[in-house]
């Protein structure tokens, strides 16, 4: 799970969080997942958990498994920044100490390293699949988060919106030379545009990838924030922009849903003069994330040229497929 485009949750009916959900009748460990399987078994044994019968839920930036006990295992590929994962675990424990409604890590020493993979264990929210919060509930969860002050020892980094964009563009082998040049030029323009923004809201703790896909209901039906990897110190508008463009750019929320969100939060980011720039930045980052995903996903690779054309021409984003 990586913020800043680490996944692209669409509307609840279409959302593919952490990668694509596996079919219900898929085997617990498909053959291509042998590395993840071995890491899961080793880390589970170390943590005193039983990996037998674990079910693969999703595969994206992480492989996500549901153990027979109400525990979720997230396994990151070798090469993952271990300090980043440690900070994510620390964020979860801090939020728990604040009684903030977020997903919880289980009480074991983690992250664990198994065969080079980085493994963390989390309490599952539900046995019935993802149940999504309403937009006013999302707003309330974010407003509560934005009133928190992180302890200095947490060492939350400043938000870097473009942290992965250059690497994603440069690593691509399926971009045309023209598309590569366009994305590179656009990236530099948007860096300058972001640096010139004057934000309305104070800087502080932000989630980094706040959207309908990252606020789920727990077993009691209460909204809970998930995907804590992108926590940072930055402008609060960054946490409000996705709900706005999911309505404004993509039509994934209705007008009423968005108005309810803005009313519940107490601020409408679409009325802020910097909104068009931040909207363009988030849309651009969604494209660069898909460029990266296209390396091993034919459907994503086919979607990339259409999205780049839309960026070039200003065409509607309403036909963008959610991932």
Image (cartoon, grey):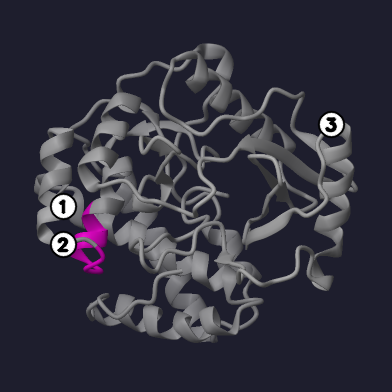
Q: Which residue is mark 1?
A: 258
Whether residue 268 is visible here, answered yes or no, is: no
Residue 145 versus residue 63 in the image, above or below: above
Q: Residues within 10 Å of mark 3 (few under 14, many from 20)?
A: few
Q: Which residue is mark 2?
A: 254
- SS for callout 1: helix
Residue 216 is inside the magenta segment: no
Q: Nearer the viewer, mark 3 or mark 1?
A: 3
Q: Pointer 1 and pointer 2: residues touching (CB < 8 Å)?
A: yes
Q: Pointer 3 and pointer 1: residues touching (CB < 8 Å)?
A: no
What x and y, as percent, mark residue 85? 67, 36
Q: Which residue is mark 3?
A: 48
What x and y, as percent, mark residue 44? 82, 40
- SS for callout 2: loop
**For marks 3 and 2 on the same chain, the one whose residue lies earlier in the sequence:** 3
Q: Which residue shows up at 42% across the image and 64% down it?
A: 15
What x and y, as percent, mark residue 303? 45, 82
Label 3 and label 1: CA atoms lie apart by: 44 Å
Residue 38 versus residue 217 in the image, above or below: below
- SS for callout 3: loop
């Amino acid at each position: 799970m990586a913020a800043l485009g680490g996944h692209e949750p669409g509307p609840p009916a279409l959302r593919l969080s952490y990668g694509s959900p596996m079919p219900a009748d898929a085997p617990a460990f498909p053959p291509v997942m042998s590395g993840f399987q071995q890491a899961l078994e080793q880390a589970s044994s170390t943590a005193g958990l039983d990996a037998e019968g674990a079910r693969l839920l999703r595969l994206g930036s992480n492989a996500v498994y549901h153990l027979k006990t109400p525990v979720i295992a997230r396994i990151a590929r070798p090469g993952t920044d271990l300090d980043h994962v440690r900070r994510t675990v620390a964020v979860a424990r801090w939020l728990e100490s604040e009684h903030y409604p977020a997903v919880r890590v289980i009480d074991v020493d983690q992250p664990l390293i198994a065969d080079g993979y980085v493994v963390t264990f989390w309490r599952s929210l539900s046995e019935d699949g993802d149940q999504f919060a309403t937009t006013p509930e999302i707003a309330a969860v974010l407003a509560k988060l934005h009133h928190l002050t992180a302890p200095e020892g947490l060492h939350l980094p400043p938000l870097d919106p473009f942290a992965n964009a250059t690497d994603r563009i440069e690593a691509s082998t399926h971009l045309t030379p023209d598309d590569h040049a366009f994305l590179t030029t656009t990236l530099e323009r948007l860096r300058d545009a972001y640096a010139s923004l004057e934000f309305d809201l104070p800087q502080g703790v932000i989630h980094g990838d706040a959207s309908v896909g990252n606020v789920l209901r727990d077993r009691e039906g209460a909204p809970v924030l998930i995907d804590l990897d992108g926590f940072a110190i930055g402008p609060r508008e960054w946490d409000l922009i996705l709900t706005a463009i999911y309505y404004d750019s993509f039509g994934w929320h209705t007008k009423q849903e968005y108005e309810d969100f803005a009313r519940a939060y107490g601020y409408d980011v679409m009325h802020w003069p910097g909104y068009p720039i931040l909207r363009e930045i988030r849309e651009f980052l969604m494209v660069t994330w898909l460029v990266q995903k296209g390396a091993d996903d034919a459907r994503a690779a086919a979607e990339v040229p259409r999205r780049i054309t839309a960026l070039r021409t200003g065409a509607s984003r309403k036909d963008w497929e959610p991932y």
